[in-house]
Amino acid sequence: MGAFLLPLLGWLGRGLTAIFGSGILMHLAFKAILIAIFTIVLPVVLSKILYGGAPILIDHMLSYLGSHAIGSASLNLTGVAGWLATKMRLVECISLMISAVVGRITFNFAKKAVFTSLGAGV
């Protein structure tokens, strides 16, 4: 029985080693290719797209703004109102309030997305 069992186990061991060994090597090679793409190729491509597309976008935006009359959307405070706004740090306060509102909206959106993906109601 031992004379039959040892060659059979050796054959199975060699077969499993070949299957799992090549699978691990393929997995490592795939990971190395992905790392190379995400650290070398993708940043170069994105920078080319962004720096190449920004002037085109700015040209279109400036031509649109030149042909349409758009008023200022900012608050222009002069004189005593400007002095009070500076002393009361009105710009920082408004910025902080808007940041808090946007943070709350983002938190609610993320909470709904997580609970929806888990299958629970909010």
Image (cartoon, helix red, strand yellow):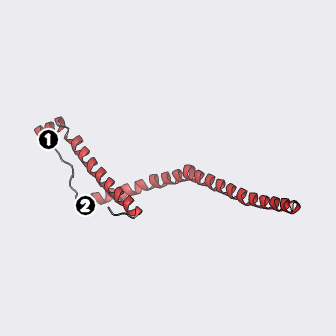
Image check: 49 left or right of 68?
right
If you read the primary sequence from the N terminus, does the residue marked by circle 1 or circle 2 appear first? 2
Amino acid at dot 1: Thr
Circle 2 packing at 10 Å, graded few (<14), some (14-19), many (20+), is: few
Residue situated in front as seen by the camera: 33 or 8:
8
Residue 42 spot, x, y in % from top left: 53, 53
Residue situated in front as seen by the camera: 13 or 48:
13
Check contact, mark 1 vs mark 2: CB within 8 A.
Answer: no
Residue at horizontal 35%, vertical 56%? 111
Residue situated in front as seen by the camera: 4 or 90:
4
- Closest to the camera, between mark 1 and mark 2, is 1
Q: Could you say which disc has been placed on residue 78 in the image?
A: 1
Residue 58 spot, x, y in % from top left: 36, 55
Amino acid at dot 2: His
Q: Quadrant of residue 11?
A: bottom right
How much space separates mark 1 and mark 2, taking CA atoms?
Answer: 27 Å
Image check: 24 left or right of 58?
right
Residue at horizontal 69%, vertical 55%? 25
Q: Could you say which disc has been placed on residue 68 in the image?
A: 2
